[in-house]
Structure formats: structure tokens, C-alpha cells
Image (cartoon, rainbow, N blue to C red):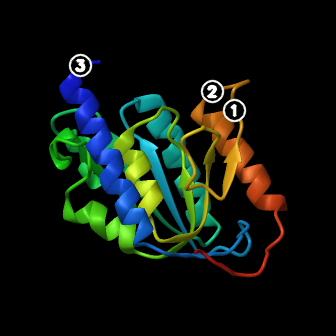
């Protein structure tokens, strides 16, 4: 990794840490039965993963959940066919600044809009998705286990099967059996 890239990563992380110090959120455990609004964050670069996530979103909507999904496309522009999908928003490389910090209004709206659950379905470490998940105004955040995910309230270890389908199955299972706790104010 070259020096300029290391500096960009360090600066982006520094900015995120400072924003997190100024941000507080109310934490509250939710299950699929107690949640009304669910936001999903994912890497939309893989067509197969995207199709699986679309089926998951459709299933949640059929269960009367208000769902909004935000996908990152690792390309200069978002493919035309992705613009017409209900409940899905996308961003691409042009929607990030030099520090990989998302800069579009749709992302800022996604971050500040309150939801009961944030489900992070990203399988790789992408700073732009970590940035969004870290600052997202959700009372309960769940995703895959990683050493860098200190923003998660619950993490699922998927090292035995690193697929979006398995992660969705595990998250669905745990969100179905979880019992609700009282609200805890974040310090």
C-alpha cells in the first residue's frame, strides 16, 4: 500500500472517530417481531448476492416491515437497471470523496433516518459501508463478525460459510429467537 493511500485511510478513520464521539444513539434490542423498520446495507457489486438480498427484502416486506436497502456498487456509475427497484438505493465510487467517505445526499438521509434494525450484509471490509453503519441511526445493529465492527450490537460468525445467503439465514434465525431488552442510552 502506498503512502498516499495510507494517509487517506488514516484521515478517513480519524474523521469517523471524531463524528462518532459527537454522536449518541439509543440502543434497544429488537427481534423480527418487534421491529417495524429495517434498513439493510450491502455490497451490490456481486449480482448473485444482490438477487439474494432482493428476495430477503421482499420477504421482510411481505411480513409488513418497512424496509430500505442501501447498496454500494464498486463502479464509476450505477447500472441503469438498478434505478428502478423499489426500496433500494445505490451509490458508487463517484459518490465518495478522496477519503472514501460517502458524500451524496441520499446516503446522508439514510444515515440520519431512524430505524429499529440495521442489517449489515457486507462480506468484505469496505470503509464506505463501515462509515455508514457506524453512524446509522438504528437502535439495533447486526452483521457479520469482524474485528473492526465495534459499531455492531450483535455479530454473527460466518467463517464456516462466507456467503450472503448463509449470513441472511443466521441473522434471520437469531432475530427470530432474540428477546427484547430495555433501552440503554449510549454514552
The residue pinned by badge 3 equals 2
Q: Residue at x 63, y 27 (%)?
A: 162
The residue pinned by badge 1 equals 158
Residue 161 versus residue 9: which sits nearer the camera? Answer: 9
Residue 75, quarter of picture: top left
Q: Identify the mark nearer the N-term, 1 or 3.
A: 3
* 146 up-or-down from 82: above or below: above
* 25 up-or-down from 19: above or below: below
Residue 115 versus residue 12: which sits nearer the camera? Answer: 12
Q: Identify the mark nearer the N-term, 3 or 2.
A: 3
Horizontal side of residue 19 vs 147, given as left or right:
left
Residue 19 versus residue 38: which sits nearer the camera? Answer: 19
Return the mark for residue 162: 2
Residue 151, quarter of picture: bottom right
Q: Residue at x 43, y 72 (%)?
A: 23
Return the mark for residue 59: none
Would you call the spot at circle 3 few (<14 residues within 10 Å), some (14-19), or many (20 or more)? few
Task: Please identify, in this view, whether the residue under mark 1 or under mark 3 is nearer the observer.
Answer: 3
- Cβ atoms under marks 1 and 2 closer than 8 Å: yes
Q: Secondary structure at mark 2?
A: loop
Query: Which percent across, then down, holds residue 51?
Result: 47, 38
Horizontal side of residue 106 vs 170, given as left or right:
left
Amino acid at each position: 500500500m502506498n503512502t498516499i493511500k495510507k494517509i487517506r485511510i488514516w484521515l478517513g478513520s480519524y474523521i469517523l472517530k471524531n463524528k462518532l464521539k459527537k454522536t449518541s444513539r439509543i440502543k434497544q434490542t429488537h427481534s423480527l417481531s418487534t421491529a417495524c423498520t429495517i434498513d439493510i446495507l450491502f455490497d451490490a457489486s456481486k449480482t448473485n448476492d444482490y438477487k439474494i438480498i432482493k428476495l430477503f427484502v421482499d420477504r421482510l416486506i411481505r411480513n409488513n416491515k418497512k424496509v430500505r436497502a442501501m447498496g454500494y456498487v464498486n463502479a464509476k456509475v450505477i447500472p441503469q437497471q438498478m434505478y428502478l427497484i423499489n426500496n433500494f438505493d445505490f451509490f458508487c465510487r463517484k459518490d465518495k470523496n478522496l477519503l472514501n467517505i460517502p458524500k451524496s445526499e441520499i446516503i446522508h438521509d439514510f444515515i440520519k433516518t431512524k430505524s429499529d434494525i440495521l442489517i449489515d450484509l457486507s462480506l468484505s471490509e469496505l470503509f464506505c459501508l463501515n462509515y455508514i453503519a457506524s453512524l446509522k441511526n438504528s437502535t439495533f445493529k447486526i452483521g457479520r463478525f469482524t474485528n473492526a465492527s465495534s459499531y455492531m450490537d450483535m455479530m454473527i460468525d460466518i467463517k464456516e460459510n462466507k456467503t450472503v445467503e448463509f449470513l441472511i439465514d443466521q441473522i434471520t434465525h437469531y432475530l427470530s429467537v432474540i428477546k427484547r431488552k430495555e433501552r440503554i442510552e449510549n454514552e
